[in-house]
Image (cartoon, grey):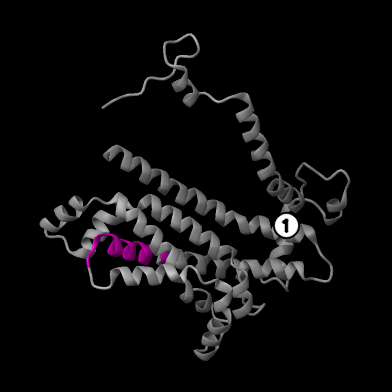
Amino acid sequence: MTLVTPVRGRTGKQPGRLRGLWEASPLTYLTLVVALVLSIFPIYWMIVVATRTNASVSDVPPPLLPGGNIGDNVGRLFDNPDAYFAQGLLNSAIASSVVTVSTVFFASLAGFAFAKLRFRGKNALLLTIIATMMIPVQMGIIPLYMIMVEIGWQNQLQAVIVPFLVTGFGVFMMRQYAAQAVPDELIEAARVDGCTTFGIYWRVVLPALRPAAGVLGLFTFMQTWNEYMWPLAVLTPDNPTVQLSINNLANAYFKDYTLMFAGTTVAILPLLVVFVVFGRQIIGGIMEGAIKA
C-alpha cells in the first residue's frame, strides 16, 4: 500500500504543486465562510422569529437572538383548527417513508438488472424509462387525477404514494452506478457458489450500492416531503400533508408569521434527521468500498 506523505510547508522538500493541493488561500476560506453565512442565515432567522411574538417580525433592526415563546407558538400550531398540523406531519411521514423505501428497492433492483443481466429488449426498455424523465410532472396531473377519482382514491393517502413508488431517474441513476461499482467477476463468483439472482442482488449488489442508495433515498424523501402541487390537487384541507398545513396557515385572514415559521421549523426537523441517517449511509458505503479497494 502506498501512503501519501503530508506536505511539509514552504521550507520542506515537497514540490509546490503538491503543496497547492493541500493548502487553501485565505480568500478561499473567506469565500466559504461568506457562502455558509448567506445559506444559514435565512434558516436561523426563521427559527428566531418562531421563538418570538408576531409583533417582532416588523421590528427594525430585525431580531437576531431567539426569544422565549417557542413553546407557546408550537402549542398554538398544533391547536390551530385550520391547519391539521399533526395530521399533516403524520401523512407526510408515512408517504415519504413508503415512497423512499419503495423507490430505493425497486430502482436498485431494476438498475442491477439493466446493468448486469442479459434479457431481450433491455435497451428498448431503458430508453423508455429515460424518455419518461423528459415529460414534465405537471403534464400528467390531470390524467392522474382522473384515474384517482375513477378508482376512488381521492382524498386518500395512497393517492400520494402509489404513483411515485418508483421513478425513472432512480432506475437510471442506480443502473449507472451498478455498472461501475459491481464487478462482473463478483457476480460470477456468487453464481458459482449457488446464489440465486435475487440472492446476488440482496447479498452482493445492494451492499455495493449503499452510497448511491443513500443519495437516492435522501433526494426521494426530501422531494416527497416537500411535494405541494399533487397533494393540493388530490387531498382535502382536513387530510393534508405538512406542506398543505403550512399553506393553510399562510392563507388565513390574519397572517401570524410566528405560527407559520414555527410550523416550518417543526417541518424541517424530520429532514435534518433523514439527512444525518442517509449521510452516514453514504459515508459508510464510500469508506467500506475504499477499504475493500
Q: Which residue is mark 1?
A: 261
**Could you classify mark 1 by the number of other residues whose Cα lies within 10 Å: few (under 14), some (14-19), or many (20 or more)?**
many
Q: Is residue 77 left or right of residue 293?
A: right
Looking at the image, which residue sits at the far right?
A: 60
Q: Quadrant of residue 104?
A: bottom left
The answer to which of 50 and 192 lies nearer the viewer is 192
The answer to which of 124 and 91 lies nearer the viewer is 124
Q: Is residue 37 left or right of residue 154?
A: right
| Predominant SS of the magenta segment | helix
The residue segment tinted magenta is: 103-118
Q: Inspect the image, locate mark 1, and give the three-letter code of the amino acid beneath it.
A: Phe
Q: Residue at x 75, y 57 (%)?
A: 72
Question: Which quadrant holds the C terminus?
Answer: top left
Q: Residue at x 36, y 23 (%)?
A: 4
Q: Is residue 128 above or below residue 293?
A: below
142 within the magenta span? no
Q: Quadrant of residue 102?
A: bottom left
Q: Position of residue 218 (x, y in %)?
A: 48, 56
Q: Position of residue 274 (x, y in %)?
A: 50, 54
Question: Which quadrant holds the N terminus?
Answer: top left
Q: Secondary structure at mark 1?
A: helix
114 within the magenta span? yes
